[in-house]
Amino acid sequence: MLFYVLKRVALSVVIVMLAVTLLYCMIHMVPGDPARILLGPRATPELIASMSARMGLDLPLPVQILRFFGNLFRGDLGMDVITNRPVADIVFGQLPYTLWLIFTAIVFAALIGIPLGCYSALHRNSLADRISGVLSVACITAPAFVVALYSLLVFAVTLHWFPAVGAGEKGAFWDQVSHLVLPAFAIGLSWIGYLARLVRASMLEVMGENHIRTARAYGLAERTVVYRYALKLAILPTVTVIGVGMGFLLSAALFTEIVFARPGIGKLIFDSITTRNYPVVMGSVLVSTALFVISTTLSDLINAWLDPRIRASL
Amino acid sequence: MITKQSKKDLLKDLNRRQFLQTSGALGLAAATSSIAEIVYAQDKTILKIRAYADMRSLDPAFSQGITDEEIHSCIYSKLIQYKPGREWSWELDAAESIEQVDDTHIKFKLKPGIMFTGGHGEMTAEDVKYSYERILDDALESTNKPDWGSLKEVTVDGKYEGTIVFDEPYPPAWNIALPYIVGNIISKKAWEEAGGKVDTTTPSTSGPYLHKEWQPKQKTILVRNPDWHGGTAAFDEIHIFPIDDENTAQIAFESGDIDCTRLSLGAVGNLKASPPENSTIEEYPSLYYVWVGMNVENEAMADQNLRKAVQHCIDVPSILQASYFGAAEASTGIIAPGLIGHRPQSMVPPESDIAKAKEYLAAAGLDGGVNVTLDVLNKAANVTTAQVIQATCAEAGISVEVNLHESGAFWSLGDSSAGERYKDIQLILNRFSMAPDPSYATAWFVSDQKGIWNWERYSDQEFDNLEAKAKATSDPAQRDEMYRKMQDMMEESGAYRFITHEATPVIYRNTIKPAFRPDGLPLLRSFTGA
């Protein structure tokens, strides 16, 4: 197990480095002089040259990449050339907003999606199962930004139940929660559908397996069979999907952060790319890529922990 | 103390259920730890307003336009400020008196007793000198230096008296320097202590509000300055929310999250028909100018007859209807109504004239039709405009291929230092912002700007001479004539088809009494309760 963990961690580091190198090359291929875009129309050629030098853009691309990683290993993500603040401060200042959003969305989706999937599997082909199927597909196909806009119109504009924009007052927990409800609902809704369908399929598969039949033959209560033996195995694919889903939720968070004018790392990346603020782009992409890799690695490790068969195969 | 062994035991004993319970408990504890910090003062008067971008700098030398200036104008003082209303004018702020004594000298006298915060003393003419002259210093690398034009120096004539000296006449100083970004007065002492420049915090201010906090990507909070020289500011706090999307801003207004915002033009019709309760919509003309430019050095567009054919093909009223929902007027040039140099009408009428366009095409030897490209920034209004242009040009036999670009790529299209792409520009739909002086509009179209912002690569020595002369002419009538002439020349070249100055519709709650510049931009320091 320890070897497996070390192997996964090493692989994760390589993946992050490759992804960041690739992105570094990609953003430098996008047309437009970053220094000129940053400084605006009235910048003189001397100012533009000075800004290029401050951003390290006057160096060959491989040197820029090596320098980035060199600084990274010293824990330095660079300085934001606009505000002169450390990129790490900026990125880690925005990251909690996105993490809370994603976490809330996943919890919300899991709390509804998993029971819904179980119920459907246990009442297969009933009217409730069919309705659940239709609703799940409807949730999956609803784009996050459409859900965001409609939820704003209904719950913020018409009913005034929740605020429309921002992330709430600093330090005011319930205010922050109320600002989190609609964005989390917008990106979590489709995940209710995913999880419900996934859990239903897994449960149906597991319920047909020998050990479940054996448990029933021993006269165990149906509740014990379902929740103690069946669900434990049926939940495994869900853990994997949630891990991978973090990456998708990160991109869904971008739209949501724009529509709800919320701070967050998605919005930070978007704004930084638009203004060609490369140090911030690189810092925030690095952190979000690492986040994605960490979450998939963690889901694999949790799977191995939960399932003795996986542990045995390592 | 947890030993290595006990840690191991703990992990060993932790089963999955305990893990979930512990995680849940930890999450709840983390979440609720901040409940105790909730402090709300419900009786505060708070103005909540939207800005279209986040704050960048609190240093006037590095302010990036109007979003920073909305904050600066609240926290700093200037000699004069823009006066709210429908016509461009100014009013005294820190100056007790100010006068243009001759073409190159402006004398001022500060009000005594204006105090800088943080114990940095009283504002004196030395502070004015420092504030203005530091922006001229090349070592500071201020992007706002061009706003000071031909400023030479500020002489200190007494504790409160000084003279602003220009190398040559610079009338725009009254419109885009003294009451705008570079006109903010900072404390010399505080800035020198801070090392000569500041970023997102400020060591000292003197305006009606203080900068309390910047929450990046979320909001900027200003609070009332109890020691403001002008009396008592209207609100306890101003919260400025950066919301770049206008539809989101509208929803935020309707849900009660903000008190005032600019609206998208597409929303005005519906909101006027059914306005939200307790709110008012006002429409202001904008200073922006939108036009279709044609690259005179491109092989295909080098023929003036083809350019003129395109000018006559473009039907401006159709564009205004389709892209601006009928809420904007056709422009006559690049200088907006209300400013010196505005032309009452353009030489080419706004309506298309396909017959005339065909005549020009025939003169160019292109009776059989021609293919051209139109580069466009990927915004909804631009895409619609491009489609209308495509449709009307097709009537004359001009086939327009539309190239969409994201903002970074678009704004470097004509940049000759960024490769050869500038040569491929044929038609380009462009939109520039503007400050309330005509020199701000014409500066981009001189020969020196070729490959920088003059993407049409239009070049005319007479235009260049006029541009330099108009900027340094004090007589408003003469300036007016020169700027009109310049726009005539631009239009005659065939390289420009002027579309619109757009419009600035704003909505606000009736619980506040807002104050806007004539172009609809908010002057937050002058907002009051209704």
Image (cartoon, helix red, strand yellow):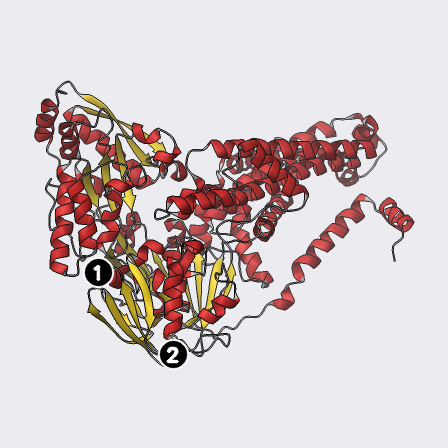
The residue located at (24%, 40%) in the rendering is B447
Q: Are marks 2 and 1 on the same chain?
A: yes
Which residue is denoted by mark 2 in the rendering?
B229
Where residue B206 appears, as percent x and y from the top left, is 42, 73
Q: Secondary structure at mark 1?
A: loop
The residue located at (38%, 74%) in the rendering is B234
**Dot 1 alpha-carbon crowd within 10 angstroms: few under 14, some 14 to 19, many 20 or more:** many
Q: Which of the 4 quarters of the picture holds residue B256?
A: bottom left
Up-down relation of residue A75 to residue A168 (above or below) = above
Which residue is denoted by mark 1 in the rendering?
B169
Q: Amino acid at mark 2?
A: His
Up-down relation of residue A201 to residue B178 (above or below) = above
Q: Can you tell which mark lies on residue B254?
A: none
Up-down relation of residue A55 to residue B108 (above or below) = above
Mark count: 2
Position of residue A276 in the picture relative to residue A91 (left or right):
left
Q: Amino acid at mark 1?
A: Pro
Please report whichever mark, 2 or 1, sits nearer to the chain's N-terminal start: 1
The residue located at (25%, 64%) in the rendering is B174
Where residue B337 appears, as percent x and y from the top left, is 18, 54
Where residue B492 appears, as percent x and y from the top left, is 12, 38
Compute the Cα span from label 2 to label 1: 32 Å
Can residue B513 be seen? no
Can residue B370 be seen? yes
Q: Quadrant of the N terminus of chain B?
A: bottom right
The chain ID associated with circle 1 is B
Where residue B61 appears, as percent x and y from the top left, is 41, 58
